[in-house]
Amino acid sequence: MFMSLLKKIHLNNMNIRIILILIIALGIILRLISSVLIMSRSVNDYKLSKYIYLMNDVSDDLFTAVTNYGFERGRVNVLLNDAGHSEGMEFNKTFVIERRRDGDAALLSALSKLSAETETELNLSRDRIEQIRAEIAILRDLSSQEFTLPMESRNPQLSEIWFAKMTEYIESIESLLILVSQDISNSDGLISRYSSLKHKAMALRNIAGPEISILTATMVSGKPLKDKFSAKISKHIIINDEIFKDLNFLSGPLKGSPVYSSLMELRESYYDEYVKHRDLLYPHAIAGGPYPYTSQEYLGYGERFINSIGSFMETLVRQDREYTILRLEESRKAIFNHVVFLSASLLLFLFVLFLLINRILNPLVRLTDNIVLLGKGNTDVTIPQLTSKNEIGNMARGMAVFRDTLITLDNKMIELEKVSNERAQLIADLKKTLNEVKSLRAIIPICSYCKNIRNDQGYYEEIESYFSKNSDADFSHTICPDCMEKHFPGMSAGTKKDL
């Protein structure tokens, strides 16, 4: 197909300049096509990076909301089960308000960023959150009123209702978080690893919070730990160990990073501090007391562990955000670099085309025109590029030698033609002379007595007649001095002279 196309183009009949320009134009077109494809991939990568950045931002907001709502859920549950002293109540209320405020701000930020999304699953998950959020607002008002009442006047079921509904609220946010995380995890391996670490940390937080709330509430109530709660805590202990194994595995490739360092601190906080006090407290909670320390002291140990989880989560969020920002910047830089490189390539093509036309094609055209003139015999030509120190200069100097040789040959041809003409004239003169003496070259038979000459037919004729026929000579008759004396002895000298 390509060869048939070349035959249709008739390259043999095309000007070299046009051929070279077509070749360069083809190179430019191919470069542009390649650049468009690369640019398209770069733009798509930038759009994907921008989308990942947005969705990761949403994920971080949802993550922050879940973390704060987890604190709120546990601390409100403590307040509903603990009359406590007024100083502790005010501190806990302030803590709840701060966590609620930060959680609501993060959730609203995430939902506003998702407002442009049209995926059905995201919309359904968002609608469910909004529905539960309205119910949570009612429970928040009820719990705030309960805080002001004496312990004996409070609704005993409100604590469980609050905990169950708040857990449902947190789980609905987590469902949306999982959808968002899955969406961006499929696009990047490191994002996927960070998302998995976040979910494991969140699972650890969701277990630790209720566990601390249950044990604290049990200590405050002075009653033995219920069997369902005891079974739940025993199950939590096993799950926590599995979570830490998963965290170690997921963070293995991140050794030396802040994430890995933060995880080591979290392990130390859990196994070296929190677990020690929980295991000491747990048998006493089953028996209903007495306890080796107060609920506030245990709550302090639990808070430090929860804060360690929060610190680990913040490190994950920070590193994840830095990575997505870096990826977005690299995508922008890739587009910028490609535009610069494409522009430079096009300028280089144009510069090469300019050099090709002005430094190669035009001098070659002038040289070939002069060669044609020389071929026609016109030696009065001015040869360009004689001083150039390149191949075209070599061609020009070779052409000058050819011109000088042609001029020398022309001069020699003129001289040769002159000599040839002179030679032809000489030959003609010689032929004429030869013809003049042609008839005198043979032996002439002449009679000894009468002096008549025998011709080719065997007849004798007078000498005058013979020479007249066989040569261009003419005869005139006169008398020699001897014959004059012999035949005319008495004639005067003057008359002899006239004869």
Image: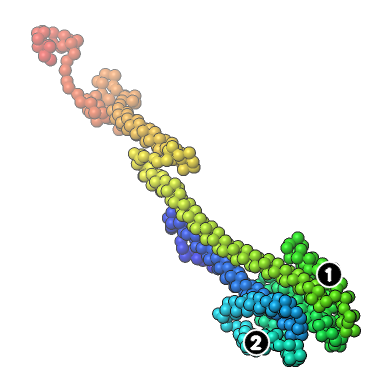
The percent coordinates of residue 236 (x first, y second) are: 83, 80
Quarter placement of the C terminus: top left
Residue highlighted by disc 1: 273
Q: Of residues 78 and 464, which is closer to you in this image?
A: 78
Residue 291 image offset from top left, x and y in percent: 87, 78
Q: Which mark is residue 231?
A: none
Of residues 13 and 192, the one nearer the viewer is 192
144 left or right, relative to 480: right
Q: Quadrant of residue 179?
A: bottom right
Residue type for callout 1: Glu
Left or right? Give the position of 376 relative to 236: left
Q: Earlier in the sequence, mark 2 or mark 1?
A: 2
Crowding near the residue tagged with mark 1, few <14, some 14–19, many ≥20 C-alpha atoms within 10 Å = some
Point out the image quarter for the N terminus: bottom right
Q: Secondary structure at mark 1?
A: helix
Distance of mark 2 from mark 1, alpha carbons? 36 Å
Marks 2 and 1 close (CB-CB < 8 Å): no
**Coloration of the structure image:** rainbow
Residue 411 seen anywhere in this rendered image of the structure: yes
Q: Which residue was labeled with disc 2?
A: 141
482 relative to 265, above or below: above
